Each structure stands twice: as structure tokens, then as C-alpha cells.
Image (tube, helix red, strand yellow):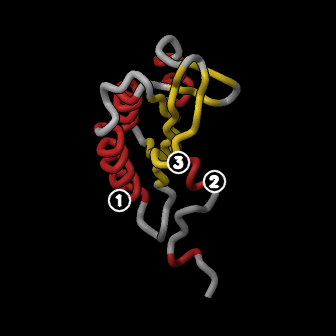
Amino acid sequence: MTGTDLIERYRTLAVIEGNEIFLTPDDALSVVDDISQGDGAVLSIEGFDIEDGSVRPRLDLIADYSPKGEDAWPTYRASTLVAARDFLSRLTGSTSIAVVVQLWTHQDASDQAIFPTRSSLPN
């Protein structure tokens, strides 16, 4: 499933403001399940309080799954999916929290040379 497919699938459930797509934690968990069927990983999750039509960032609801080393893509990807499911499962059922989930694919990572192999590194 491509990013465009995901946006179309969740468009009616999301609140879209600018480049941000705000989802309920339950819907975000469904997104993680959907990307687990393909080649996607979760780069980060940001949580927000939604009250009286205003959006307020929650610094205690930020999860950063940026790569920290040279893990192979399958290992990195699997670890982000497990961590994202755990993070979101603690928020499910909340009606006053929205989340933004940043996703990426192996192609995104390859284009940015995030996962170099030892043989491609300079000596």
C-alpha cells in the first residue's frame, strides 16, 4: 500500500491541516497494521491534545524511531512497528488525543543513504 493509498483510505477519518494528518490513536494503530503488510516503517509519532477546536502539542507523547545505527532494513522496520503498536495501544480509546504518524519505506531510506552497508562506507 502506497502513501497515497493510505491517505485516501484514512482521509475521511482524519483531520488534515496543512501537511499534517491528525488521526485518533485507534485509526493510527490501523495505519501501522496496514503498513506492516508492505514495506513501511514508522519514523515517528507525535501526540496532541484536542480541546475546544484547538490543537496543543504533547511533549510527553512524542516517539522517535529514527535509525540509531546500521541495522538492516528488515530489523529496523520490525522494531519500529512493534514500538509504534506499543506506544499507540496505550492511547487507544482516547477521544481528546490525536496523533500524527510519520511513515517511510525502504526506498525512502535508500534514497537518503540512511542504511549504508559496511562495504559502501569509506575506509
Determine the secondary structure under disc 3. strand
> How many numbered marks does the figure carry?
3
User: What residue is pinned by disc 1?
Assistant: 75
| Residue 96, image quadrant | top left
Alpha carbon distance from label 1 to label 3: 27 Å
Q: Nearer the viewer, mark 1 or mark 3?
A: 3
Mark 2 or 3: in front is 3
Q: Position of residue 38 (x, y in %)?
A: 39, 37
Left or right: residue 120 compared with residue 75 = right
In the image, residue 70 above or below residue 20: below
Nearest the eye: 61 or 84: 61
* Residue placed most toward the observer, 123 or 32: 32
Q: According to the image, label 2 marks what residue?
A: 111
Is residue 7 visible to us here?
Answer: yes
- Where does label 3 land, which residue? 59
Could you tell me the amino acid type at mark 3?
Leu
